[in-house]
């Protein structure tokens, strides 16, 4: 088998409780045991991917984190890092603070929070968050940001996206990662771009490339994959951008294997 699957985590591989279903785990292991390559691509930080890989009992050649801003290999070497322009990052953080929107910032290994999220809102599997209400002062010095995250409503996101596109569109990309979160990334960062980078590092090149996702940040994966899937829980917009829709990742893998 010479195939590779790129799979999103939250809402895709993981259910609402942050768990994969047992049938899907068996399908992933069988796919790998038959020579396939399974790579996680997520908006989470890298240490959360490692946590899930251990939970699944696998270890992939590459890990795509922060929606493509970071790629690490199985030896924990950084294969790709797309950092934000520090001057622009500071300006956006200040803008969000003026609008009284919560903003969090990530570098390669940590997420910096202005205040604790609270137990219910802490979605990290491995908590490497650093509480620092003055992190903006350290951008470009001790903090080299790879992404910014803010929280709000669709209407606020539309206005923010329009502003960023107008003023910083050559350097910054905005992407809605959930109904109430908006992320700011380097213009060169996306899951799709990360996949292209990984494919250049794989030898021999896979004969078939599959992407499985459920959100706007997965659309760039669909653009570079040969076979694309989403789950029934995904929005109609996402479902309309893939080849097939199934209840679980295990079902997607089974269909992919039967199709190639």
Image: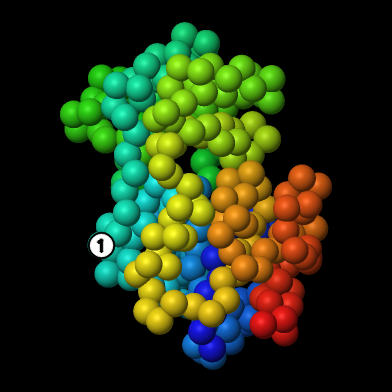
- Report whether residue 124 is seen: no
Is residue 31 toward the left or the right of residue 23 in the image? left
- Measured as percent of width and height from the top left, residue 246 is found at 78, 66
Residue at figure coordinates x 47%, y 60% from the top left: 195
Quadrant showing the N terminus: bottom right
Residue sitting at the far top: 98
Name the residue furthest left: 141
Instruction: Look at 58% across and 46% down and name the residue there.
Output: 217
Residue at figure coordinates x 40%, y 14% from the top left: 94
Q: Position of residue 48 (x, y in %)?
A: 44, 56
Question: Could you tell me if residue 77 is visible in this image?
Answer: yes
Helix, strand or loop status at disc 1: loop
Viewer-side residue, 48 vs 39: 39
Q: Residue at x 47, y 9 (%)?
A: 98
- In this view, 205 is above or below 158: below
Q: Is residue 164 above or below residue 173?
A: above
Q: Is residue 129 above or below residue 27?
A: above
Residue 132, picture quadrant: top left
Q: Nearer the viewer, residue 190 or 145?
A: 190
Picture quadrant of residue 154? top right
Count of residue discs: 1
165 or 83: nearer the eye? 165
How did the renderer colour the structure? rainbow
Q: Quadrant of the C terminus?
A: bottom right
In the rendered image, residue 74, in percent from the top left (x then y), is placed at: 33, 70
Disc 1: CA contacts within 10 A as few (<14), some (14-19) or many (>=20): few
The residue that label 1 is drawn on is: 77
């Amino acid at each position: 088998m010479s195939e590779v699957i790129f799979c999103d985590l939250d809402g895709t591989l993981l259910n609402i409780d942050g768990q994969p279903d047992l049938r899907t785990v068996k399908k992933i292991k069988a796919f790998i045991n038959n020579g396939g390559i399974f790579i996680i691509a997520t908006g989470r930080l890298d240490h959360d991917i490692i946590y899930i890989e251990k939970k699944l009992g696998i270890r992939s050649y590459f890990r795509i984190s922060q929606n493509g801003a970071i790629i690490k290999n199985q030896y924990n070497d950084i294969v790709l890092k797309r950092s934000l322009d520090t001057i622009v990052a500071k300006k956006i953080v200040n803008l969000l603070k003026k609008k009284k929107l919560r903003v969090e910032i990530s570098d390669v290994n940590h997420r910096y929070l202005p205040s604790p999220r609270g137990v219910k809102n802490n979605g990290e599997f491995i908590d490497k968050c650093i509480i620092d209400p003055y992190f903006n002062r350290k951008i470009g010095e001790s903090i080299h940001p790879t992404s910014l995250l803010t929280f709000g409503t669709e209407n606020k996101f539309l206005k923010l996206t329009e502003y960023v596109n107008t003023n910083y569109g050559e350097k910054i990309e905005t992407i809605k990662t959930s109904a109430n979160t908006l992320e700011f990334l380097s213009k060169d960062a996306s899951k799709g771009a990360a996949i292209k980078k990984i494919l250049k590092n794989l030898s021999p090149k896979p004969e078939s490339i599959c992407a499985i996702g459920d959100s706007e940040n997965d659309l760039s994966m669909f653009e570079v994959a040969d076979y694309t899937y989403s789950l029934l829980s995904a929005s109609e917009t996402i479902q309309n951008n893939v080849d097939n829709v199934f209840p679980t990742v295990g079902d997607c893998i089974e269909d992919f294997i039967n199709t190639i």
